[in-house]
Image: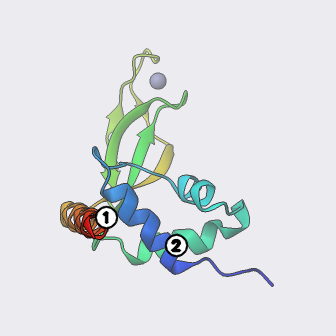
Amino acid sequence: MQAKVSVSKFNQLLESWASQSPPIMQFTVENVLDTLGLDSSYYSKVLELLMKRNGDEIIAQKVALCPSNHKLRTFLIDEEVDDNFECFCHENEFEVTKFKLVFSFEDEFKADSLKKKENRVSRLKDLMLI
Ligand SMILES: [Zn+2]
């Protein structure tokens, strides 16, 4: 049986990424797996954890890519994409067929995570003064 993904480690990771300056933006499921030391068999579990927070703490997005994987534009996950695109590597406009799934943080979650981090730091400072 597959081991469970530690939700508390997952939460800590999100908070630490959101409280970095600048915060980590447009991270992928693979980034989370790598950082937590999980292999790709955990992909769907981590994806599920991320999607549960979509619209709340996290914004799920899709990045339109050209056939040579250049980033074109970022859309919300449910947004319809019916435009044609141009890329410097292409002579003509083309329809996008490749997307990369990425996640970013809501502003409020970034602010909250930063506050928590600052509180932690000031508590540690208090301890050092004793
Ligand atoms: Zn291109």
Pick the residue in front: 49 or 19. 19
First reached walking from the N terminus: tag 2 or tag 1: 2
Which quarter of the figure has residue 125? bottom left
Residue 62 lies, in percent from the top left, at: 41, 51
Q: Which residue is mark 1?
A: 128
> Is any part of residue 32 visible from this angle?
yes
Residue 40 lies, in percent from the top left, at: 70, 61
Colour scheme in the image?
Answer: rainbow
Q: Which mark is residue 9?
A: 2
Residue 82 lies, in percent from the top left, at: 34, 47
Number of numbered discs: 2
Pick the residue in front: 64 or 92. 64
For the N terminus, the image quarter is bottom right
- In the image, residue 14 above or below residue 62: below
Residue 110 lies, in percent from the top left, at: 24, 61
Residue at x-position 20% and y-position 65%: 115
- Binning the other alpha carbons within 10 Å of mark 1 as few (below 14), some (14 to 19) or many (20 upward) gives few
Which quarter of the figure has residue 79? bottom left
Residue at x-position 36% and y-position 31%: 85
